[in-house]
Image: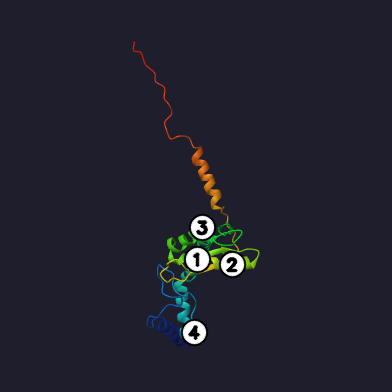
Amino acid sequence: MHGTTLRLSANLLATCLMVSTAQAFWGTQSTECCGPCQPQSPASDVCAYLKAGYDTNSMWPYPYVCPDRVRAHAPFEVMVQNGWRRQNLLGAHYFDRETGKLTRAGELKIEWILTQTPPSRRQVFVERSMDTSVTQERMTQVETFANNIQTNGEQIAVIDTHIRSASRPASMVDAERNSFIESRPPAVLPAGTTSTTTAN
């Protein structure tokens, strides 16, 4: 009787493992990351429970590869987004101190962002001021100028940010460049010395 019970249990297990192929408990194994790497709902009977356990053990350690890949890629995406935010940042020096309007450099910066950057990165970030009304005025100036640029119907995003611009006014950069050009030596070869060799 005991032997008959063992044979029935073995046959039951073999039947469960030989059922028609279905999606594995953790998804189909491949060289790429699977979709939602999450377990399915609890098994409703013993056969499904055994099959799910078998599939889980067969797929190990692949179920943990997908979350690891996501966590490994996440910091790089954050760094890319922060880099574009700083690249497309309009600091305080892009606005006139007296009138609050965009300077010529600010207009050229916006025009470059909306026409030269990849379409997915065409967002304009505005440096916040301690005065909220100043920040709002800056954003209004940017939106007004940006709407006058042909962007093929693309929605223009103007976002304020706490990031501070590390740049300097264009007038200062231009003055340093002009000073460098004016003080550089002439691009000529130095006068050489000639010597004669007397053959004995």
Mark in the foreground, 1 or 4? 1
Locate residue 44, reporting x and y percent.
Answer: 49, 87
Q: Residue furthest left?
A: 199
Q: Residue at x 51, y 64 (%)?
A: 124
Q: Residues within 10 Å of mark 3 (few under 14, many from 20)?
A: few
Circles 2 and 3 in contact, beta carbons < 8 Å: no
User: Disc 2 or 3, which lies upstream in sequence?
Assistant: 3
User: Disc 2 or 1, which lies upstream in sequence?
Assistant: 2
Name the residue type under label 3. Arg
Q: Which mark is residue 104?
A: 3
Circles 3 and 1 in contact, beta carbons < 8 Å: no
User: The residue tagged with tag 2: helix, strand or loop?
Assistant: helix
Q: Residue at x 48, y 58 (%)?
A: 108
Q: Quadrant of residue 138?
A: bottom right
Name the residue type under label 1. Phe
Q: Is residue 132 left or right of residue 90?
A: right
Gap between marks 3 and 1 measured at Cα: 11 Å
Q: Which mark is residue 137?
A: 2
Circles 2 and 4 in contact, beta carbons < 8 Å: no
Name the residue type under label 2. Glu
Q: Which residue is mark 4?
A: 43
Q: Which residue is mark 1?
A: 145
